[in-house]
Amino acid sequence: MGTTIVILISVVYLLSLFGIAYYSEFWAKRGKNFWQNGYVYALSISVYCTAWTYYGSVGRASKDGFLFLPIYLGPLLVLPFWWLIMRKITRICKTQGITTIADFISARYGKRVSLGVVVTIFCVLGLIPYIALQIKAIAQSYHLIAHNAFALPAQPASIWVDEVFYIALGLGVFTILFGTQSIDASERHQGLVVAISVEAIVKLVAFLVVGVYVVWAVYPALPTPPQADFTKSYYTTEWFFVSLASGLAFMFLPRQFQVAVIENTNEAHIKKAMWFFPLYLVLINIFVLPIALAGNVLFSNKGITGDMYVLLLPLFYGQDLMGLLVYIGGFSAATSMLIVEIMALSVMVSNHLVMPLLLRVFKHPQNASLGLWVLYMRRVCIVALLLLAFFYFKFFTARSSLVSIGLISFVAISQFSPAILFGIFWKRGSYWGAMLGILTGFAVWFYTLMLPNLIQTGILPATWAYVEAQAVGKQGLDAVSFAFVWSLSANVGVYVLISLLGTPSAKEAEQARIFINIFKISANPQQTAWRKVYMPDVQNLLFSVLGEARGRQVISNFDAIHQENAEQYQAFILYVENTLAKYIGSASAHILVESISHREAITSSQVLEIVLESQEVRELNEQLAEQKAELEALTDQLKYTDKLKNEFISTVTHELRTPLTAIRAFSEILADNPDLEEEQRHEFLGTIIAETLRMERLINQVLELEKYESGKQTLSFLPTNLNTLVGEVAKNLGVLAREEGKTIFVELEPDLPTLNIDKDRITQVLINLLGNALKFTPKETGEIYLRTRLQDDKALVEVQDNGSGVLPALHQLIFEKFYQVEDQNIRKPKGSGLGLAICKQIINYHGGEIWVESAPEKNYTKFSFTLCI
Amino acid sequence: MPSKILIVDDEPNIVLSLEFLFRKQGFEVFIARDGAEALTILEKQTPDVVILDIMMPNVDGYEVCKQIKQDLALPTKVAFLTAKTKEADVQKGYEVGADLYITKPFSTRNLLKQVQELIYEK
């Protein structure tokens, strides 16, 4: 078949793919997303089935029989867990604006640039051979179909006359067209996904056609019956470990991450893919063994590698058209992988390697148009990566089979799985754990797998042979299993150990919290790191990265939500950061936003936690201290009250004892002396009655005071003439005074208005004060003055006497209930101690005051109380 | 010769009852309304027994007892008759030299019996 035809068909095929992509995006922009469904999503995941699957499976099967299967068993084994793992990862990426696997790991461990750099470098190192492999497959199939060459030319042709070089460049252009229309790396590449789905169908159909042809047309015509006898020894453990490595690679290969996570438009699609994709895998593998067996019969003794059996068989039987179909199928498998992988890697390289450098150069990003830079950067990266892969192919991969290089990449990629899987479920996983784990894993990977491979393929000199001897075939494992087991266990061991030893930084802890609790957080987004950002800065930043139109759009998007409240404001900053992350990666976005944000000592969750905790503790302490102080005060008061109460009870019982003593004594006298004279008996009985009344009065007073103190006493305030009241009391007690030769002088204020008072209670007060005055004034010379006056809009009542007086120290105390002079043995003047206490209560109830002024040495005492007018 | 007894109390009704009781027993009864009055009487009389209240105006019962036992060094027996029932008060009463400490309210028969015993002790 002519070179021109093959190239023409290749170009036409690519163009028609682009047409489909363009067409679907054209409709997508008009809101017709009929391509957005679970089947397209599941088909796009088949970028997993590369040229390695398409050609390499048969190659492997021709040598090792069923051993080609673990690579597909892996995905089948992990798919049931997708709902648990991939849905979580997808949600995290959407919430955080994450666009690549490097971004994901970097974001999980505190958005540190360094981790993104390491992951990116290892991705490139691990994947360039794998991409080269695809180029090799394209080259081999091209040479076979165009030049009928069973092997690639032994001496590499000059690049400028190598058709494969131009095919690679064409793919680069195609990737640029598909992948970098917009700088928003998280924007769905709808057209690309549809194109990949079409390619998925093409490669499947082509493979099935060959399979059917081989089984039903070639088999009957075979010279000898195919031998299903694979006597070559292989390790059974290989099944397990290669499956595991494949399962991990199936999730975390950059291209898989791209189609499964970044291009996911609906989490429900994951569910569809979980059953639909296994079906695809079964179909594309079903004819592998028959084709390999037939190929072995026909070509094994001709020194032809099994990798090309698929294409060779139809060509061998002169089925050129079918050969072309097979070529296109293989071309589909290779290009779909190549385009997506390169695109994902270019985003990684530009975001994690170039952007941080760029940000260092442009310290004031608003001065440069960062957005355009991002776009150019990514395009340059695509071309650079493709060229790198091409040269790798050109100079290094000629001698290795498709499968071995693929597995080396798988083991490399699986080094990211501890950081990712632990990262989304284990809070303690730390930056240093991830960093050192990945570095260790890759070191072991390089030593046990990459290095021996480089030696085997002659890239490194044979002086390295001892390394190979050291590494390969130990523990009865095959090279891949051995490398996988050791690299991954070292990786996990270091990760867990270092994580357990260290304490995560504030930002890490914050991100860990978000990643692990993503479903809670994405349902109820909240920002805990409080940052202060000035709007002009935000605007400049957005304009420089996104361009003015898109920047305004972002701001206006958020303007719809009010910014006045602090939480909304923080959410806005987070929104800006996550929006930027979609374009330039989360670490770079974080750096940019941090560069314009002014946070004092406040940083993220740790501080927040500390603040919250210490706040809580401090508040709690304060509360406790307050409560303690309150309690102490209360205790003191209670103690005081208790002391007063005890004294009160003691005094009351003492006061009750006196009448009780008299009553008992006289009762016993009366009982023991029945022959008492009538007159004396009457006297004693009268005394008993009097003392009983005294007890009753005392008890009533106690109860009355209790009523006042507990606020239960009710008074009836009525308009009353105070002068009249004072006059009556003076008149009533005047009789008693005259008997003792004492004089009561009454001086009344004539202008005293009518007062609103409880007549009976005020009378009680007046009697009490006047009674006291009478008690303490000397007989014959006693003089008592009763006055009413007007003073400061208040009525003032004074009861003045020339009695023995009250010591100044006691002026307050005598109004306490049952006040007894400190020297308890000097008897307090007669009468219960309750009188003045009750007076005070009554006057207080009237809103007035009562006090005493006294100068005992001058025989001057004056009790006064006020009443409101 | 009848025994002499001094009753010191500021409660008239208690004095009245005590006066009746001891008169009936043939005592010669002196009465004081407070401590000061009691001391005045004691300047002239030396009763066999003093019935002494503690809480009184002016001079309290302890002071009177101390005067009797220490300053005046009278052979008079002192019986406190008081409403102060606390242990500390009782102790203080004996410390100042009391021969008897009776709390109010009291049993008339018991009081008479104990006062008789005090006199026999002399």
Image (tube, rainbow, N blue to C red):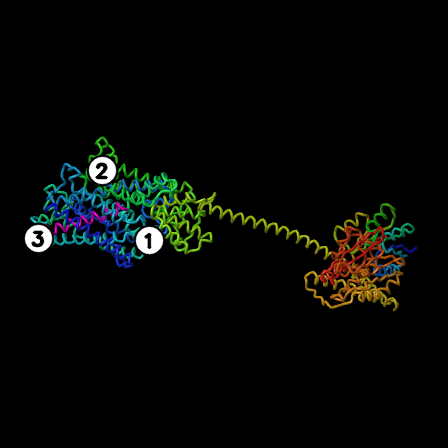
- Label 2 packing within 10 angstroms: few (<14), some (14-19), many (20+): many
Say whether disc 3 or disc 1 marks the residue closer to the N-terminus: 1
Say whether disc 2 or disc 3 marks the residue closer to the N-terminus: 3
- Label 3 packing within 10 angstroms: few (<14), some (14-19), many (20+): few
State the residue position of label 2. Answer: A453
Disc 1 and disc 2: Cα gap in Å?
36 Å
Q: Quadrant of the C terminus of chain A?
A: bottom right
Name the residue: 70% across, 66% down: A714
Q: Quadrant of residue B56?
A: bottom right
Q: Who is closer to the viewer here, A719 or A243?
A: A719
State the residue position of label 1. Answer: A87
Q: Is residue A743 above or below residue A92?
A: below
State the residue position of label 3. Answer: A220
> Magenta segment range?
A320-343
**Left or right relative to A358: residue A279:** left
Q: Give x and y (percent) for residue A236.
A: 23, 45
Q: Is residue A665 above or below residue A82?
A: below
**Left or right relative to A617: residue A270:** left
Disc 2 and disc 3: Cα gap in Å?
40 Å
Residue A327 magenta-highlighted: yes
Residue A40 magenta-highlighted: no
